[in-house]
Amino acid sequence: MIHVVGRTAGGWGIRVPARQGEELRQVLIREGALDPSLKVLRDGSDLILPLRKERKGAAWFEFEAHTGREPLPRHELVGGIAIMQEEDPSGAEALLKSRPSLHTVVFAQGEVHGEYRTREFSHLAGEPTTRTLVTEHGHTFVVDLAGAYFSARLSTERQRILTQVREGELVLDMFAGVGPFAITLAERASLVVAADLNPKAVALMLENLHRSRTANVLPLLVDARHLARILPWRFDRVVMNLPLAGTEFLPEAFRLVRPGGAIHFYSLVSAEGEHTARIRELCGTVTAERVVRSYSPAQWHAVYDVAVPET
Ligand SMILES: C[S@@+](CC[C@H](N)C(=O)[O-])C[C@H]1O[C@@H](n2cnc3c(N)ncnc32)[C@H](O)[C@@H]1O
């Protein structure tokens, strides 16, 4: 027995056991065959997926219609680029038309991976590029999604750290990417040293320094493992944003921070206090532990603010 509530519309639909529903939904989206104006029906342990037109195995059903305009496909915005999790060319065209600020829609082919923390994308609609401009809190950054890591979701975090920086501080960003933390913190710091081992990230950081006329950031193309050996300074504040492998670099950060300084350590965790014992071993005190964002049902990105003793 199928119950339909709300505004209804007749249309072609294809029946599938619910367990296989998501797989078939993805196939139909890729083929541009799913009708996004109608809601998926449930009938016992089956789903009925609405189709744009008849196909083999299809039958006519009464569907509930989405109210108002067709819903836009799920996406994440980074500057003028929309990143879709589904390879849906017709959804991408609809998305592109829906926002004048968008120039490109891409499909993320996988998760962030590798030492450079980058992802592969395929082009779905608009201009075929992965470069865009992102504006946050008065700064505009050039980013290239395929070439170097950038997350717009960290903008609040950058502002939070900025409020802790005192005028004239010497700051180190060990994993600087295209420079969003470094350029933000340079508003108050006297000098920010910004290291990254991805040449494309450092090239984009140079562009960003030029664009923002920031002259107190020193970009370094270097593996953070060498920093304590090559830098003559000890820093008031060290930012460590390498959530999957940051723990390996904690001793290096402690070598680079001055007595009485602070470390902001980002990590992917599955329990509160996961790194507290290790930080204590290195003689640091956790002054705050915050959730930055959720990652999966059992894991989240956390930031530990760490105070380093005076002596
Ligand atoms: C998660 S991203 C953070 C980038 C930047 N802090 C941001 O918020 O946009 C980590 C960065 O660390 C860099 N990285 C990875 N291993 C590194 C290492 N051993 N030394 C220096 N940089 C490294 C990657 O290339 C990447 O740009």
Image (spheres, rainbow, N blue to C red):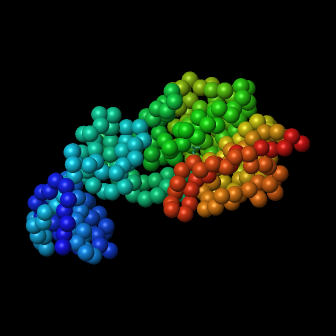
219 to the left or right of 284: left
Which sits in the foreground, 77 or 122? 77
Name the residue rendered at 64%, 37% in the picture. 161
Name the residue rendered at 56%, 60% in the picture. 299
Name the residue rendered at 73%, 38% in the picture. 237
Numbered label tally: 0
| Quadrant location, the N terminus | bottom left
Which sits in the foreground, 8 or 307? 8
Percent x, y of residue 175: 63, 45
| Quadrant location, the C terminus | top right
Using the image, determine if residue 12 lies above or below residue 162.
below
Which sits in the foreground, 143 or 67? 67
Using the image, determine if residue 186 lies above or below residue 148.
above
Residue 27 seen in this snapshot: no
Using the image, determine if residue 158 lies above or below residue 50.
above
Percent x, y of residue 194: 65, 38
Residue 287: quarter of image: top right
Residue 299 seen in this snapshot: yes
285 to the left or right of 268: right
77 to the left or right of 39: right
Residue 264: quarter of image: top right
Name the residue rendered at 22%, 52% in the picture. 66
Percent x, y of residue 82: 36, 44
Q: Residue furthest right?
A: 311
Percent x, y of residue 24: 26, 68
